[in-house]
């Protein structure tokens, strides 16, 4: 099997089998990102995918879930995704669901009916890197779409019944813009039925375009206190019935809980964490983890 940029997946996908459907990233211009820079974007052919599927039992045994590899494995065409599911049923019958990273624009060319068909053959819970629901922030980090476009896509996925996961990039707006980012991202997600909201905290890594912008005074990073205030406000504004996951290495605290049932408990936890936190210690942590990205 081949993995052009190694294996990348969220922490909760460790028990999966992996299958490459794309190389690189179809956008590859997010200013904060350090991943998938070693390859130009390319879609795998169905022949390559089939050859790799045949090897999955040798490498991963009998996995129940496949997590597609590449920055956005859902960028491949609908027909290829459906054929991939068919080949997995043929060669790896243990597989029940298929996930992977995805961008909002991976779904522009897929109709609601096609997404419904994908759900029927086992596609479930793609991790969609929405990042923010604020157009100022989306432009600031160069995501390549607007909040209105993100909402249109998420509504289409929601209506199709395909389970999905979204994220929130805490601190993406930079110094002084956290509460706006929290409000507008919670507003973007209002009324939707995602399986989970996953969060991570902005970590400005040396060598990235965002770091160079910061050196030039064009971007000012949020303080760690600001990030905590922002995540508190985001949780306070969330209206969804979903799982809230805050377990990425970039996060200052790690929790997984269900909202709204545990919302007040989570808000109280964040408040207490802020009370006992020291900005200097938190900044030391932020500096240390830049090496991981």
Image (tube, helix red, strand yellow):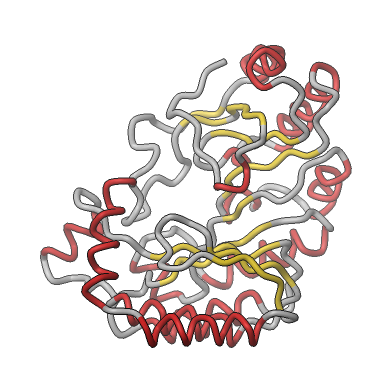
Residue 158, by quadrant, is bottom right
| Relative side of 23 to 102, left or right | left
Residue farthest toward the front in the current orientation of the protein: 276
Q: Residue at x 66, y 49 (%)?
A: 126
Q: Specify the quadrant of the image occupied by residue 64.
A: top right
Q: Is residue 93 left or right of residue 285?
A: right
Image vertical order of residue 86 relative to residue 268, above or below: above
Give how far across and how far down residue 205 sits, in percent: 25, 54
256 is higher (above) or lower (below) than 31? below
20 left or right, relative to 228: right
Q: Position of residue 46 (x, y in %)?
A: 67, 20
Q: Name the one closer to the observer, 42 or 234.
A: 234
Count the marks: how many? 0
Relative to 84, does residue 238 appear above or below in the rendering?
Answer: below
Q: Specify whether 291 is left or right of 243.
A: left
Query: Residue at horizontal 66%, vertical 69%?
Result: 257
Depicted 91 relative to depicted 230: above or below: above
Farthest residue toward the left? 216
Of 97 and 13, nearer the camera is 13
Identity of the residue drawn at 45% across and 74% down: 135
Q: Say which quadrant the N terminus sits in.
A: top right
**x and y percentages locating residue 151 in the rendered image:** 63, 70
Q: Residue 14: horizontal and vertical position, in percent?
A: 60, 39
Residue at 20% x, 48% y is: 207
């Amino acid at each position: 099997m081949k993995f052009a940029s190694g294996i990348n997946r969220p922490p909760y996908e460790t028990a999966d089998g992996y299958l490459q459907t794309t190389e690189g990233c179809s956008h590859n211009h997010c200013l904060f990102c350090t991943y998938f820079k070693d390859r130009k974007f390319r879609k795998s052919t169905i022949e390559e995918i089939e050859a790799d599927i045949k090897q999955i039992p040798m490498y991963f045994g009998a996995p129940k879930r496949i997590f597609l590899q590449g920055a956005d494995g859902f960028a491949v065409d609908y027909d290829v995704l459906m054929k991939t599911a068919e080949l997995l049923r043929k060669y790896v019958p243990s597989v029940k669901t298929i996930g992977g990273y995805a961008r909002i624009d991976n779904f522009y060319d897929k109709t609601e009916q096609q997404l419904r068909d994908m759900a029927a053959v086992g596609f479930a819970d793609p991790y969609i890197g929405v990042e923010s629901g604020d157009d100022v922030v989306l432009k600031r980090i160069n995501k390549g779409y607007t909040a209105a476009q993100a909402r249109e896509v998420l509504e289409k996925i929601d209506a199709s019944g395909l389970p999905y996961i979204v994220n929130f990039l805490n601190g993406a707006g930079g110094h002084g813009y956290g509460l706006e980012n929290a409000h507008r991202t919670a507003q973007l997600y209002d009324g939707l039925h995602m399986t989970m909201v996953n969060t991570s905290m902005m970590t400005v890594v040396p060598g990235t375009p965002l770091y160079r912008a910061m050196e030039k005074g064009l971007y000012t990073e949020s303080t760690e206190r600001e990030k905590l205030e922002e995540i508190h406000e985001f949780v306070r504004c969330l209206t969804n019935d979903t799982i809230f996951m805050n377990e990425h290495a970039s996060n200052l605290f790690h929790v997984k809980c269900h909202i709204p049932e545990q919302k007040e408990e989570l808000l109280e936890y964040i408040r207490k964490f802020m009370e006992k936190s020291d900005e200097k210690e938190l900044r030391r942590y932020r500096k240390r983890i830049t090496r991981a990205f």
